Amino acid sequence: MGFLVVLAFLGLFMIGFPVVYAILLPSILYVLVEGLPFGLLAQRITYALDSFPLVAVPLFIFVGNLMNLSGITDRIFRFAYTLVGRVPGGLAQVNVFGSLIFSGMSGAALADIGGLGRIEIDAMKKRGFDPSFAGAVTAASATLGPIFPPSIPLIVYGSVTSVSIVQLLVAGIMPAVLCTALLMLTVLIVAIRHGHARAERWPTAGELVASLVPALPAILAPVLMVGGMTAGAFTPTEAAAITAVYVIFISAALYRELTPAHLWHSAVLTARSSSAILIIVASAALFGWILAVEQVPQTFAATLLGWSKDPLMLLIIANLIFFIAGMFLDSTTATLLLVPIIAPPLVMAGVDPVQLGIVTIFNLMLGLLTPPMGLSLFLVSDIAQVSIRQLLRALVPFYIPLVSTLVILTLAKDLTLWLPRLIAQ
């Protein structure tokens, strides 16, 4: 029955059912066929949402929306331009570096694109950059948000696997820095080859300070959050709440651009986005419970371990599974449906669960850049006013640093684990 439920989900999804319906309908039919109490549906769904760590998800979404509406995004962009605008590639380098800074507060790729990315694409087009190239840089650099703290996908992963969310968030710092460096190197090579525009001169110390001071309160937010979590002062959920209060304070008291209308609009956008995520969380929890009852994870684990017991080989197999899944499913759905099945045998074989979390989420983020379900592609295509085909053609050079980062994270686990271990000492 468990495998029939999985096949029913895949069949409904492939013929075009929304993913929530594709998950819920087979689950409801299972309950009816098995003669289980119908109230079980509400019980499992409600139980899934009764989770303290998941409270961080709408809070971080709220922070990202608030930043976009209260002028913080503009200040981050100006500082990034002053700092790296002179590097070959100019605004393209700003795009990558600014995404790293912005991701330290939003925690989501699409928030990065919708907020800072919109500003970056418009600025690049005005400076003569090809719109498809501007969109490609924006889409590629947006993958930094979900692995650099705070990270909504890592919070979801931690809640599913019971792995320390603090360790996952800290573990994402070095991979994000590595990916940023590789993306900036790629932009450098492309810019030199095509003679892209850049700032006319390096900034003076006064200009650098003048751009840093307005952006500094926003830049300090992730430092406050990560520092507080690693020091044990508060949990990730409490960190999300503190970050939200902090952003409201600096927007109202320091920048003086926050209005009641901004707060209300941010809250409405947050409610919509959170609902879309949490209804998938609830539905997937019911689906996962059915698979657990039917012992599908145990059967899959036995099959996977029958192929190989080598941790690296299993991690490579998992990468292939997640990469294919990411082409069709959004990261939240793929995490909720696949991680409970795939993670146990890999951990049993010796793969570190924190490394697996970083590899899994980064892998699924590549799905945002791959058709047919690449959400980043559709959003960037709309903002930059280019076709998906033009955008994919411009993205070709950026797949190299992104895939290279995934390979390094798979082969060199110490890159991911050394910082959590250092903090734990």
Image (cartoon, grey):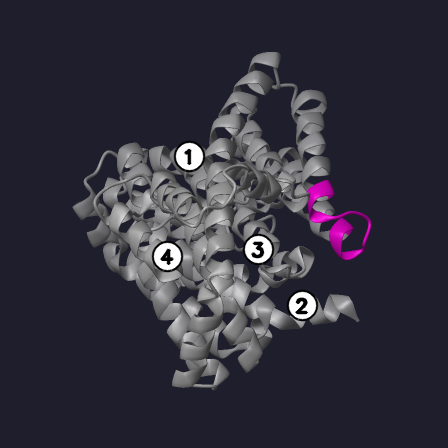
Front residue of 334 and 48? 48
Q: Nearer the viewer, residue 282 or 292?
A: 292
Tag 2 residue:
419
Q: In the figure, residue 362 lies in which quadrant?
A: bottom left
Q: Residues within 10 Å of mark 3 (few under 14, many from 20)?
A: some
Instruction: Answer yes or no: is residue 97 visible.
Output: yes
Q: Amino acid at mark 4?
A: Leu
Q: Residue under label 3, please give it.
A: 160
Q: Residue 366 got which mark?
A: 4
Q: What's drawn in magenta, residue-wise?
A: 228-238
**Residues at discs 4 and 2 in contact (Cβ within 8 Å):** no
- What residue type is disc 1 on? Gly
Among numbered discs 2 and 3, the one appearing first in the sequence: 3
What amino acid type is highlighted by mark number 2? Leu
372 versus 385 height, above or below? below
What residue type is disc 3 on? Val
Q: Earlier in the sequence, mark 4 or mark 1?
A: 1
Cα distance, mark 2 to mark 3?
Answer: 23 Å
Q: Mark 2 or 3, which is nearer the eye?
A: 3
Which residue does the numbered mark 1 point to in the structure image? 114
The numbered mark, 3 or 1, whose residue comes first in the sequence reads: 1
Relative to 162, 9 lies left or right? left
Q: Helix, strand, or loop for circle 3?
A: helix
Q: Does 185 appear in magenta? A: no
Q: CA distance from mark 4 to mark 3?
A: 21 Å
Q: Position of residue 108 (x, y in %)?
A: 50, 44
